[in-house]
Amino acid sequence: MACFTVPMALAIGIGAIRKKIPATYHINWLITLLGGGVVALAVEHVAHGEVVLYPPFLTAMSNPSDTAVMLHEIATLGVAMAITCVMVWVTMVLYVSKIDATKSRHHQIE
């Protein structure tokens, strides 16, 4: 229902401070991972009528019992998706850092 709100909030927050993060962390990769997932899920939720373009925007907000389910989904699936994106990004950054370190060692030998 609204699981995409957690990665969306994370992407917005990181985007706000991205200039303070060193380029070696490739923070735009994380923002792209999060943003791509958010767009895909938002489109899917709109297609299934869970998100509408008029208030309350999230259809689960109109029924208190649905709101509880929505909040549980945000807390479980949304957080899990955000953590997964961060873990993929960390793996990518570590891999590229290792490749860069290997290249610099080879250049020092030559």
Image (cartoon, rainbow, N blue to C red):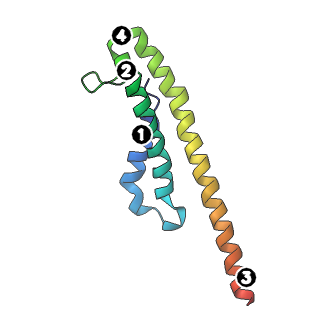
Marks 2 and 4, the one that precedes in the sequence: 2
Please rate how many residues cluster around mark 1, counting C-alpha atoms within 10 Å: few if below 14, some from 14 to 19, many from 20: few
Q: Is residue 62 above or below residue 4?
A: above
Q: Earlier in the sequence, mark 3 or mark 4?
A: 4
Within-10-Å neighbours for mark 3: few <14, some 14–19, many 20+: few
User: How far is mark 3 from mark 1, CA to CA?
Assistant: 41 Å
Determine the secondary structure under disc 4: loop
Q: Residue 63 — which label?
A: 4
Q: Residue, x 68% and y 77% (percent of image)?
A: 103
Q: Quadrant of the C terminus?
A: bottom right
Q: Are marks 3 and 4 in contact (CB under 8 Å)?
A: no
In the image, which is nearer the foreground, mark 3 or mark 2? 2
- SS at badge 2: loop
Q: Amino acid at mark 3?
A: His
Q: Amino acid at mark 1?
A: Val
Q: Earlier in the sequence, mark 3 or mark 2?
A: 2
Q: Which of 46 and 55 lies nearest the eye of the viewer?
A: 46
The residue under label 1 is 39
Amino acid type for the residue under numbered disc 2: Gly
Between circles 2 and 4, the one closer to the viewer is 2
Q: Residue at x 41, y 62 (%)?
A: 20
> Which numbered disc flags the more N-terminal residue, 2 or 1?
1
Measured as percent of width and height from the top left, residue 97 is found at: 64, 67
In space, the residues marked 2 and 4 are separated at their CA atoms by: 14 Å
Q: Residue at x 63, y 65 (%)?
A: 96
Local SS, label 1: helix
Where residue 26 appears, as percent x and y from the top left, is 51, 61
Residue holding disc 3: 106
Res. 23 mark: none
- Residues at marks 3 and 2, CA–CA distance in whole angstroms: 55 Å
